[in-house]
Amino acid sequence: MKTFLKNTFVVWGTLVMVVVIFGITASYYLDNKAQNNSLLATVSYSHLPQMINGLPLHLRIPTINVDASVEYVGVGADGTMGTPQGPDTVAWYSLGPRPGETGNAVIDGHYGWKDNTPAVFDNLKKLQTGDKIYVEDENGLVINFVVRETREYDPKADAAYIFSSDDRKSHRNLITCEGPWNRNTASRPSRLVVFADKI
């Protein structure tokens, strides 16, 4: 009987030690796992672009004397980007990034207006590589861009890459019409795009 009790105490003592050791190990493991998960969460989300820029209010391009208020547009019934209501304002594509955020923020404006009224982007074609573009947001923050290149496109050309980018950088693309007015089609023969990068 004594031997049995002795063996029983040894067995229970061993079990208690195992439980204690297991508890300590489990606690250490869970604490470390929680810390690792917290670290992973930080790493996973730290690279995401932050919505730090306000809505754009003004576009300034000193080289061609542009100082225009910004309207907000989406996609029209014909599937194309909307345009500003008048000749002296520009329109930001509000379904895309805000100026200064990662991706392509797109602004368009009119070229040529009825009765020879000056339009905001009449001289857009005069922009050259290195010229500066400034966008002021609702918080008073001014985001600076520099012109990279200018291209002309057929209106029916695929323009998807003008609105999207995967290089994790911030771009500002300006769009307007170009060429003589065609009364039959009620449009102009080409589109002018100025590609600019945040500096």
Image (tube, rainbow, N blue to C red):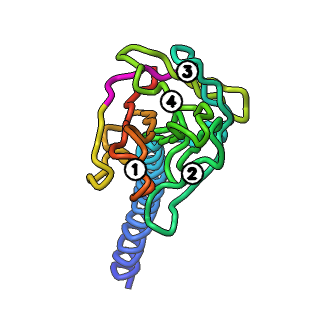
Q: Amino acid at mark 1?
A: Asn
User: Which residue is pictured at 48% across the width and 53% down the height?
Assistant: 34
Q: Are marks 4 and 3 in contact (CB under 8 Å)?
A: no
Query: Of the residues tagged 2 and 1, which is closer to the observer?
Result: 1
Q: Nearer the viewer, residue 52 or 138?
A: 138
Q: Residues within 10 Å of mark 2 (few under 14, many from 20)?
A: some
Query: Of the residues tagged 4 and 3, which is closer to the observer?
Result: 4
Q: Earlier in the sequence, mark 2 or mark 1?
A: 2
Query: What residue does disc 3 label?
Result: 61
Question: Residue 41: horizontal and vertical position, in percent?
Answer: 46, 49
Q: Amino acid at mark 2?
A: Ser
Query: What residue does disc 1 label?
Result: 182
Q: Earlier in the sequence, mark 4 or mark 3?
A: 3
Q: Residues within 10 Å of mark 3 (few under 14, many from 20)?
A: some
> What distance separates the C-alpha of mark 2 from that of mark 1?
29 Å
Q: Are marks 4 and 2 in contact (CB under 8 Å)?
A: no
Q: Secondary structure at mark 1?
A: loop
Q: Amino acid at mark 3?
A: Ile
Query: What residue does disc 2 label?
Result: 94
Q: Amino acid at mark 4?
A: Asp
